[in-house]
Amino acid sequence: MRIDLPRIGTWEAFRTAARGALSEGLPPEDVLWVFDGAPQADLFGDAPVPTGARSPVNVPKSFVSLAETVVWHADPERFARLYALLWRLRDRPALMADRSDPALARLREMEKGVRRCAHKMKAFVRFRDLAGDGPRRRFAAWFEPTHHTVEPTAPFFTRRFADMDWLIATPDVTARFEAGALSLGPGQARPDLPEDGAEELWGTYFCNIFNPARLKVQAMTSEMPRKYWKNLPEARHIPALIAGAESRVRAMAETAPTLPPVWAERAATRPAPVRAVPGTLAELRAMAAAEPPLPGRGRMVLGEGPAGAVLMVVGEQPGNEEDMAGRPFVGPAGQIFDRVAQGVGLDRGRAYVTNAVQRFKFRERGKRRLHQPPNRTEIEHGRWWLEAEIKLVRPRLILAMGATALHSLTGQRNGLMQRRGQVEDTPLGPVFVTVHPSFLLRLPDAARRAEEMALFTQDLAAVARLMDRRAE
């Protein structure tokens, strides 16, 4: 069967013909779709288009939405593909939800292509003013769409520019809006449009809002493909703007405002706020308890352990379990630490255990509180509390577990894996570097997890030996 579809009114014609063919029980291989006189598939037939339905046809709404977009694609097989999918939907109504189906996936890609083309038309049609004496202003534009998107996109322009008459000419279809009525006609060659005095003003505006510091040529050409540049009046300025972007950025940096000298001197000599460290750990905990609550943060959780402990263990920040209990290292990571430490003879009861950041930072999702890593400001705030604990405990060795602890104790968080297993001298005392136990929990590969667990055990065994030596 041969089914002819017009260039204008394609969607309505396809919907009527597809329903008729489906009701007649015609399989896809017996249908030849012809668009605007050109065959659209390798299937031939000479039967007339069916007009009477022999059986009711129920078409899923999701298919109608898909087909209403895909019919405007430029792929010559689009009608055959749509009808083949419709034929399969008779026996598999849930097929529209099957993302793994290759035929449906291909049609979804075509749907995206049509939507992209319609978006580009809305963004890159540039009207030029046509001189006229009538009551309504007259404009015209030339556009070269990738797909047949003029007809489905024209209503957007009727709403956007309802107070003027306009014409959008393309090689495919010409849209004309006059006196509030939209009409569609055959495509045409590019008309000789007059110069528009507003284009110079628009070019000046475009050049002034162009930010060279944020220039990304690949991203720009992705959003504004070069094929449209010849019809965009502002595009003539783009090559010069790209070429001069680097020099403009340097000029912007050189002319950036600076702090007036008087205020700069005052800011440099202004004393930093001083917060005295209390004399005991109990007084420090009382200060922590008085800290005001913060959004998305738990309560202050300081360390625990004997004053004068030989070893101080520093983790990253409390988790949900630590925040609920008010004690450090009682959650899954703390349990791993306790188990490995006990196995190598490292007595947690003889160590002072704390964190570099004292509050649990989280993001709520339903009833759950999801852990969030601390930022630089939070690490800096936590450093005062950590240094206060170090001053009061006076440990002879500090175990830094994880990048946040390493940052707080040494000022440098990079290279954790290269620095692990080593002792680094710092103003706060000798620091032994290793990973945080939560790192072991996050490893999905069992073999890698076993390997890292063995290395963590070696690190804690080395700390236990150093702890014994320094206790003598």
Image (cartoon, rainbow, N blue to C red):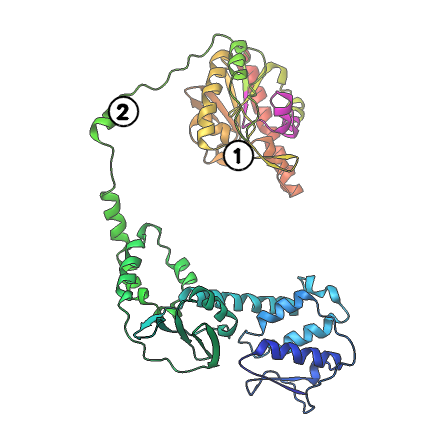
Q: Residue furthest left?
A: 261
Q: Bounds of the magenta span?
A: 313-337
Cβ–Cβ below 8 Å for labels 2 and 1? no
Q: Is residue 316 magenta?
A: yes
For label 2, count other residues whose C-alpha is less than 10 Å away and answer few (under 14), some (14-19) or many (20+). few
Question: Where in the figure is residue 179, as x and y percent of width and height?
Answer: 43, 74
The residue indicated by pointer 1 is: 373
| x then y, percent, for residue 282 | 54, 10
| Label whose residue precedes the other's in the sequence (2 or 1) | 2
Q: In this view, does 192 lie to the left or right of 446?
A: left
The amino acid sitting under disc 2 is Ala
Q: Which of 184 and 268 is in front in this view?
A: 184
**Residue 427 relative to residue 203: left or right:** right
Which residue has dot 2 on it? 268
Total marks drawn? Answer: 2
Q: Is residue 175 magenta?
A: no
Q: Residue furthest front?
A: 135
- Looking at the picture, which amino acid does disc 1 mark? Pro
In the rendered view, would you say 109 is above or below 2?
A: above
Dot 2: element: helix
Q: Is residue 179 left or right of residue 54?
A: left
The N terminus, quarter of image: bottom right
